[in-house]
Image (cartoon, coloured by chain):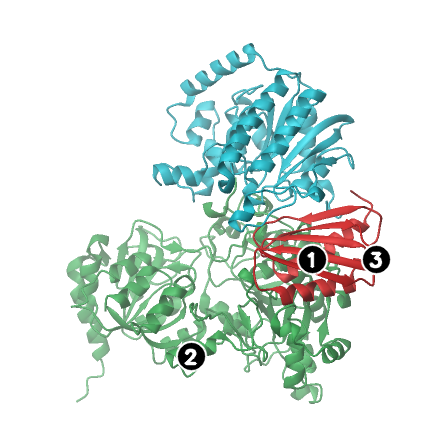
Chain colours: A red, B green, C cyan
Amino acid sequence: MERLSYTLDAPIPAGGTKPRAIVGIVASGNLEVLLERVLAPDRCTVEIATAAHGFGEVWAAVVADFVARRGAGGLRIAINDGGARPDTVALRLAQGARLIAGDAP
Amino acid sequence: MRDWARQGAARTARIAAGAPFARGKVVAASDLAPFLEAVLRPGDRVCLEGDNQKQADVLADALAEVDPGVIHDLHMVQSGIVLPSHLDVFEKGIARRLDYSYSGPQAARIARMLYGGQIELGAVHTYLELFARYFIDLTPQVALIAAVSADRDGNLYTGPNTEDTPTVVEATSFKDGLVVAQVDRIVDRVPRVDIPGDRVHFVVEAGKPFYVEPLFTRDPGAITETQILTAMLAIKGLYAPYGIRRLNHGIGFNTAAIELLLPTYGEKLGLRGKVCTHWALNPHPTLIPAIEAGWVEQIHCFGSEVGMDDYIAARPDIYFTGADGSLRSNRAFCQTAGLYACDLFIGSTLQIDLAGHSSTVTTNRIAGFGGAPNMGSDPRGRRHPSEPWLKAGAEADPDTLAPLRRGRKLVVQIGETFGDGNVPLFVERLDALALAEKLDLPLAPVMVYGDDVTHIVTEEGIANLLLCRNADEREQAIRGVAGYTEIGRRRDAGMVTRLRERGVIRRPEDLGIDPLDADRSLLAARSIKDLALASGGLYRPPSQFRNW
Amino acid sequence: MNPAFEPEALSWYEANARQRVAALVDPGSFREVVGPEERATSPHLALFDLPEQFDDGMIVGRATFAGAPILIAAQEGRFMGGAVGEVHGAKLVGLLRAAKTLSLDVLILFDTGGVRLQEANAGETAIAEIMRALVEARLAGSRVVGLIGGRSGCYGGGGLIAGCCSALVVTEQGRISVTGPEVIETNRGVEEFDARDRALVWRTMGGKHRYLIGGADVFVDDGPGAFRDAVRDVLKAPGRLDRATLDAEQSRLERRLTRFGASTDAVAVWSALGIADAPAVPGLSTKAFRAIATCRESADDAR
């Protein structure tokens, strides 16, 4: 497993008040994203454990775009990755941000 | 004095040599190998029928069993290298030279054999150009074909999978070649005459149906959210604005997603009756919900599809059917229809370079072309106008006087920026170039040339290459939808922004599409079982697609 | 999980474990125990350089169902095929022991291929502990209902646990067995069982067949609404596990063997049950199937 970690300035705070949310499944080509509202609202950390080695540059780009475009401020995000493609990663991150911002369980 | 009828005499001799194995025209299956040794000659040009769907499998196996001491150096001219026996004949020295079109299932083995020099390659063709060459310089001396049934006069019933048979027989039989057909059974009277008996010289009763690959069945259960997003982009960003009524779809999951979104997402957009009404398309099971919802007026087919026969027979207003009620398919006609009478082709590929060239070749796999390069090209001989064709032509060439301006067929490549195993769709250099160098080919096997491609659709958006005015813009438009691939990450961000402002690149949000709405609940059928239910039980999926 | 989904629009087969739980119980009532934020992951997978899942593929907690408190467990069939490992198993053992202590009924949403190969000893032990805890909870009066309709079916130890349940609710896609198709083919040959013949797999192990021979109690459509209705009905019956139950089940199994022991295929079993057009059974809609399934073998309390 390769472990990656990013700490970013987050221009948009996460919406809603839910303390945490989780989306996705660890399976081939898929991933789970656990989001916890534990940081200052202008910070975001992302920790990744991935089965696919050598994609650090791509992860950095996906994570940076996500934090720039979606409400990610205040979130500690942990990812278990089963070798998902970047488009799937971006989708799960966006789903996670929507889920923690929503009022529904 | 020149003898002007040597070919006819040669055929008469072949028939005489085969006669001892036959009662009338009927040869016993057990005698097939010695029969073939009797009627074939070393160096013959042989068409062994088989494409990406139906296979003359019994004749293929028999050909692989002939004695290479007797029959050797054959020149195979055939649509498909699909069955193991198609390559066994080269390994055993029965055949030497090959001109063909499609080799999907044998892609790895044919690559090894080509690299190893076991096959002398003429060329890899599209279906239509190989058919064309059957009538010019690759006319078969012997054709080994497949049908459902025959009568004792050799009249053949090819059933729903007629496909290449009329073309192969036409080229062979009318140029004094020999036609041998395998059939499931000999009957007193065939349900309809697809091939008249005077064009068929021998018939073998195989006692089983010819093999058909269910190549056009896509399980809706395997369609991903990203594929659904690309399908939404295609429908809202291409089908709707161009008003695409006449079209062909490739066989990937992205286009299957489009088919399954028509009755849901397409309906919501109010597009029924305005797009996707006339098709050159195999009987895709994933189109059933759209047909049932009244989207489709008619479909002409290259071949049939396993399990679809009863459904087709029950929908004769939609499909082309014969007097017996079953589908009449014809690959040559349908390829021509796709080329000249469709305004859009959309399909997936494995690699796209910065000029927009695409290829399904990787260094270890040579899958051939099939029909895609023909579908995915702009026909220079087209003269009839249509709204999408004129609109695309105007986008490409706004300055020319309209009555003198060619229209453009829309040729769309659709896919996710990364494929299976995280392999990027976009590359600096196609593997096809490495292959051409390795095999010393004058042409790299390019599936769709960049100058034919009009749009590229990925989850990041749509690049409209018609609107690009130079190679730089074209490259940045491609990079601008290449997502997180290396090609995409190395974009000129400023130029991509300007291209987006001009509508050359359109993002999901530019089209009013939220990527988070790309959900499997949008699919009109989420499983093969749903398709069977949507067909009212008429579609009978093959066992490998069932989970009930 | 996905608020865009109406429960009716959700396929049980496609849904993940969290979606199933959320859609099954009273809206918003689920409270997870040892949730993903506690990161109680497998201690074994790292040794094999395999990715972990924060909940180890097992979700347990409490909720209300039709207003009454209940305990619930759900396996994630797409994480390692829903296979049972040490933590995964321990969470279910704990839940079943809590059921006995709290006198609550339990729903188990099965979706498993059996024991996780990478932690086989721990997994096998967990299966045994689960079965013991389940039986003890039942003896104390709790009802334990199994729901089966996921991608991975209910195989291996999962099939054994299911056999111990008070009642089983199954869909057409749901499969119940101990030995899986591939294992049978590997050990007995393709002549015995062709694992690639999916129609054969489903007519031998799938929901319709299990329902017809009394291997499952309720046959439902592939959606949480259908499961909810079935669970509501099943929970109306009194919980019972005693000597009389087991004696009755024993004689029922003996009778089943006499009736169908000579059949070599499920279709023959269905014919022997008195179904006129047995080969048509797999193609039938749920409604049509229920109508002809009145002749099925009964199933109650044990199987």
Type of amino acid at the residue the image marks with label 3: Pro
C22 lies above or below B44: above
Q: Name the residue under label 2.
A: B436
Percent of width and height locating residue C39: 67, 44
Which sits earlier in the primary sequence, circle 1 or circle 3?
A: 3
Residue underneath mark 1: A91
Label 3 neighbour load within 10 Å: few <14, some 14-19, many 20+: some
x and y, in percent, of residue B83 in the image: 35, 60
Left or right placement of residue C260 versus residue C92 in this view: left
Which chain is disc 1 placed on?
A
Image marks 2 and 1: residues in contact by CB distance under 8 Å: no
Q: Which amino acid does label 2 sit on?
A: Ala
Indicate whether C28 appears above or below A35.
Answer: above
Q: In screen coordinates, is B530 left or right of C28?
A: left
Q: Do labels 3 and 2 share a chain?
A: no
Residue C96, quarter of the rendered image:
top right
Q: Given contact means CB atoms under 8 Å apart, are the residues at marks 3 and 2 in contact?
A: no
Residue on which disc 3 sits: A13
Q: How far apart are marks 3 and 2 (CA)?
A: 53 Å
